[in-house]
């Protein structure tokens, strides 16, 4: 995935800006904490891009849902302090450049035929 994007950037006109969209685990710029290294992939997509193309400026956003549900091997709930509307903050770790706080998430819906 990283090499494909690098090849596409190489043939793009000078000054082209690229927006890559991926999940939070793939957008990390720093290795995961030791307790998560067994389960979180490393290097992430963003970190691999930074290593293989050091001249690129890479910024990443950690999406933080405050309430709602998500789907990992079934629907699960997560919660945090409720918020009324979305806002952006500087990231609280080196893993991302910023954090986008969103009030509520909705689990993916899978249609079976």
Image (cartoon, rainbow, N blue to C red):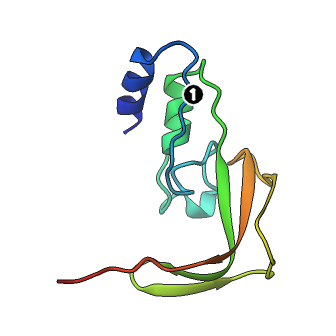
> What is the count of numbered marks?
1
> On the picture, is 96 further left or further right than 9?
right
Nearest the camera: 108 or 77? 108
The N terminus lies in which quarter of the figure? top left
Q: Which residue ends up furthest to the left in the rendered image?
A: 113
The C terminus lies in which quarter of the figure? bottom left
Quarter of the figure with residue 54: top right
Regarding residue 52, the answer to whether it shows in the image is: yes
> On the picture, is 94 further left or further right than 8?
right
Regarding residue 43, the answer to whether it shows in the image is: no
Nearest the camera: 39 or 51? 51
Nearest the camera: 42 or 56? 56
Q: Residue at x 57, y 27 (%)?
A: 17
Quarter of the figure with residue 24: bottom right
Q: Position of residue 71 (x, y in %)?
A: 45, 78
In the rendered view, tell whether residue 23 sits above or below residue 104: above
Q: Position of residue 27 (x, y in %)?
A: 56, 48
Residue at which label 1 appears? 17
Disc 1 on helix, strand or loop?
loop
Q: Residue at x 58, y 87 (%)?
A: 77
In the rendered view, tell whether residue 84 sits above or below residue 25: below
Quarter of the figure with residue 92: bottom right
* Mark 1 neighbour class, 10 Å CA radius: few under 14, some 14 to 19, many 20 or more: few
In the rendered view, tell whether residue 87 sits above or below residue 56: below
Q: Position of residue 43 (x, y in %)?
A: 50, 43
Q: Position of residue 86 (x, y in %)?
A: 76, 66
> On the picture, is 45 further left or further right than 1?
right
Nearest the camera: 89 or 30? 89
């Amino acid at each position: 995935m990283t090499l494909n994007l690098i090849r596409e950037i190489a043939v793009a006109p000078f000054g082209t800006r690229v927006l890559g969209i991926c999940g939070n685990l793939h957008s990390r710029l720093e290795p995961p904490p030791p307790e998560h290294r067994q389960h979180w992939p490393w290097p992430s997509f963003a970190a691999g891009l930074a290593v293989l193309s050091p001249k690129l400026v890479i910024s990443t956003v950690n999406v933080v849902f405050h309430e709602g549900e998500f789907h990992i091997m079934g629907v699960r709930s997560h919660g945090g302090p409720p918020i009324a509307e979305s806002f952006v903050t500087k990231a609280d770790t080196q893993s991302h450049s910023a954090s986008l706080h969103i009030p509520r998430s909705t689990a993916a819906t899978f249609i079976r035929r």
